[in-house]
Amino acid sequence: MLAELRAMRAADLPTHGGRTLAYVYDSGLDGVDELAASAYALASSANALDPTAFPSLLRMENEVAGAAAALLGGDGETAGTVTSGGTESCLLAVLAAREARPEIGEPSMVLPETAHAAFHKAAHLFGVRAVEVPVDPSTFRADPAAMAAAIDETTVLVVASAPSYAHGVLDPIAPIAAAAAARGVRMHVDACVGGWVLPYLRRAGHPVPEFGFGVAGVTSVSVDLHKYAYCPKGVSVLLHRSAELRRPQYFASARWPGYTMLNTTMQSTRSGGPLAAAWAVLRHVGDDGYLGLAERAGAATAEIAAGIEEVDGLRLVAKPDSTLLAVSTSDGAAFDLFTVADEMRARGWYVQPQFARGPSPVNLHLTITAANRGHETEFLADLRASVDEARARGPVRVDEDVLESVRALDPDALTSEQFAGLLDAAGMGAGSTPPERMAEVNTLLAAAPEPLRERLLLEFLGLLYRHGTNG
Ligand SMILES: *Cc1c(COP(=O)(O)O)cnc(C)c1O
């Protein structure tokens, strides 16, 4: 079975070596994975559903949350929860904010248009209206005055990112938090991706403004340990400024004949595995270790960013504040970015296409980690070669009639069968192996209005996840 599993895993994108520049984070340190796997195995059958039954998990959770609080400007009052990931942390921040204001009939939250989609999921699940505020179109940072102006009587939460995933820039946390505090509204800083790297970059001398509990008015902060803390997947921390602010996030039900269900998160049974792995990795890598990892990721980011600006036809969408880059084409560049992504894939790199939205042009996302240090030249050489090849190949050819009909489709008027036909036509149908080159599919998806793109991809997902097929 393990041999079979290894063989299956060999067809996945590599999770180590820095060649997959989204989804995965590699410290490049020897022994971290083995330690994490052993710790995971030791605790994976224990259940954090009842911390009194498994005091080891209670202790580890308090220690992990305490470490996060110490890093993010918290103190003895800061109250945390270990969750399964960034989305769950963001969901719970929204839920706690809504539950704390039961008198507001139709609650809303104010977020920059660059906020993570996790907040739209929270809006969808919890009936909290998302009020999207335009960002500064040149820096992609939230506009504090516009954010302040968007707060009204229904606002239960204001959100900002440190940094945003799509552009890697820090929103101006202090003025936004001040505006929220002035209206008596909670303010969540989404530091899911930056929370474990920015404080160390600051320590290493990078100009990183305060973004955590050191900023007045910030009431909660999320940080994912499965990102720049380089822990195995399934672990994030949500911190509140006080236990009182955390309290409405909790859920209890005595309304059944079984045990009184007491939940701190969306989950009820909660494996001790991810928590124990994170606890072990945090202790093992330690403060000095994370400082070194942040320095390596920061240096790799600077070198790759500088190299990209030298490539004829490429530019950075925003000046990066962290270790994430968004790469677009310069004005008048005559090649297709989706083709560049395909060419990078053919050269063994995964870069993540991001569609245009508002002021944000179509671009390629790069999450740079410590493992990229020392391999910047390799990456840049392949990127140059990919751009050259994309130029040689010319524009992506998608039938103009097809594009027209995609633009005109009403997703609400189509059945799943009709969608299956569309996906077939796009080479994404049931049983079709994913195309080597995604540029055509991405061009079609880019042309689709957002609701249609969402629906197309959901129907595609439904086709993927069917037993009896083997993907
Ligand atoms: C990754 C990320 C999230 C969501 O985290 P998941 O662990 O993927 O659920 C939320 N916000 C930001 C800024 C992120 O980068």
Image (cartoon, helix red, strand yellow):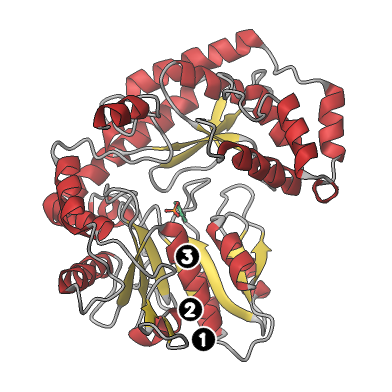
Q: Disc 3 designates what residue?
A: 90
Q: What kind of residue is marked 2?
A: Ala
Question: Alpha-carbon distance for marks 2 and 1?
Answer: 6 Å
Question: Alpha-carbon distance for marks 3 and 2?
Answer: 10 Å
The front one of 404 and 419 is: 419
- Pointers 2 and 1 in contact (C-beta within 8 Å): yes
Ligand 1: give its quadrant.
bottom left
Q: Disc 1 designates what residue?
A: 100
Q: Which percent across, then down, holds residue 171?
A: 50, 59
The front one of 309 and 344 is: 344
Report crowding for label 1: few under 14, some 14 to 19, many 20 or more residues within 10 A (C-alpha): some
Q: What kind of residue is marked 3?
A: Cys
Q: What is the quadrant of the N terminus in the image?
A: top left
Q: Disc 2 designates what residue?
A: 96
Residue shown at 53% from the left, 83% from the top? 99
Vertical comparison of 282 with 181: above or below? above
Question: Alpha-carbon distance for marks 3 and 1?
Answer: 16 Å
Q: Which percent across, then down, holds residue 107?
A: 64, 79
Res 153 → quadrant: bottom right
The residue most toward the top is: 392
Mark 3 near ligand 1 (CB under 8 Å)? yes
Asked if residue 192 shows in the view, the reply is: yes
**Residue 115 vs residue 86: left or right?**
right
